[in-house]
Image (cartoon, rainbow, N blue to C red):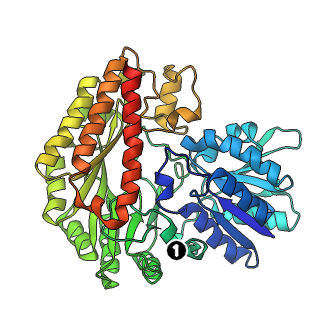
Amino acid sequence: MRIVLADPPAPAWNTYMRYSPNLGLLYLAGYLRRRVPDIGICYVDANQSVDQHLKTVARQKPSIYGLSFASPLSAVVKPLLRRVREVIPEALIVCGGAHPTADPLAVLKGSPTDICCLGEGEATFAELVEEFLGHGELATVGGIAYKHAEGEVAYTASRPPIRDLDSIPFPAWDLVDLRKFWGLRYAKSWPCAEVVASRGCAFNCTFCADPVWRGTTPRVRRRSPEKIAEEVDLLYHRGVREVFIRAAHMNDNLDWAIKVFEALHALDHPDLYFQCNLRLEHITPGLAGSMRRAGCWSCNIGLESGSQRVLDGIKKKIVLYEAGAQLRTLKDHGIKVFAFLMLYQIWELDQGLQIETTREVFQSLLYVLSLRAKKLVNQMSWSFATPYPGSDLYRICEKFGLLPHNWDQSLISLSDRMTISIPNLSKLEIVTARVAGLFIQGLLNLSNRERYQCHTIGPNLKHGLMKLRHLLGVFAQSK
């Protein structure tokens, strides 16, 4: 028996899928191997074209085809799954990931998918495979939605998350050649990889569509520093020289974060570098010092807005006047900051709709420029607020009728496309904000030498061409 675990082929507009393999699928493969040791698994990554993808599937002839995807790719996935069904008409098609978890009904009704895995997938998918092998009743598997023979959709009992992340085997790194992936766009070295440090998030930002983890208890589960360091050491000996430590926020538990970086430092690999995500609060000299000693040179921080009113509205829980001191702590320890902004946010207050104004949007862009002038921020990226299914933002858009009349998932494929019909917001305002955002992003990012490393030139040129194409499209639309 063979199983194919696959990413959708990356569309031309989505360069991010080409940077690294899908960790979720590699975790599924590692877990499944422990439960069903003799099974054959093939991972099909996003770098393959649609035709290559289908040829690989036809060659493998899997009994089960598993596809993982997020909401921006749902429009790409529908025609892909129809063609996959033609290639393997008897196989079981299983979909998982953020979008099938958030909207399984649409996936099952709108494609030849047989089953959607809801939430964390390792135990669910392994049990599903075991039942399939034993010709058991798939409807007894917890944590899935599936089609009845007559086409109706049914849901099984929800499955609790795996509390002890250390009990999950390492991802099946042997299934991928990391040198075939672009790696991080800003990196000191290459090849690059990502390592999961924790799952879940303790916060409730309105724009976040994280249905895989939301509602789980505890809200955040963390791997032990020793296990994280063990996996990083394994990757180092496979040739990896830069690692992104994947956690919603490394510093939501300071003691744990410092121990993680101390464990990484103890590996004594001076040619190994790290990046991570941080929240703006809880940045202390102790944390920054441990990061720097471990070789962590850059972090991502979601600033989101330069308006305290907006930050309060979207439940970001950032105190803006404290930001400078927190960022200076990182600067003093030689750690660079990549800031994220989200423009034209909306939220609900006392049953009424609140909208981020164009004035507040430009206030945010100028705020980042002021931080750059103080060398507290090194790079930035931005997007328009996007209503992903499963987010509170999506609920608000539905409640107040702010989704476009021609709404479908393809509209959320591009982060610099406005997908919310904000009342009284002119096309000129949208275009001006977009152009200003792209200009400031380019201004900051071009000044960073890491983008000119040999291993980052190709990915950055391709990404830059994509942005240029969008900018030219903006000017064409504004005429």
Position of residue 173 in the picture relative to residue 152 (left or right): left
Split into 4 quadrants, where in the image is the C terminus? top left
| Residue marked by disc 1 | 166
Helix, strand or loop for disc 1? helix
**Where residue 219 sits in the image (x, y, percent)?**
47, 55
The reply to whether residue 311 is in sight is yes
Q: Nearer the viewer, residue 320 or 254?
A: 320
Q: Nearer the viewer, residue 186 or 160?
A: 186
**Where residue 221 sits in the image (x, y, percent)?**
47, 63
Q: Residue at x 53, y 70 (%)?
A: 164
Q: Residue at x 28, y 24 (%)?
A: 358
Split into 4 quadrants, where in the image is the N terminus? bottom right
**On the image, which quarter does residue 154 sit in?**
top right
**216 vs 307: above or below:** below
**Where residue 100 sits in the image (x, y, percent)?**
64, 46
**On the image, which quarter does residue 466 sit in?**
top left
Q: Residue at x 36, y 47 (%)?
A: 464
The reply to whether residue 305 is in sight is no
Number of labels in the image equals 1
**245 vs 159: above or below:** below
Amino acid at the residue labelled 1: Asp
Q: Residue at x 23, y 60 (%)?
A: 449
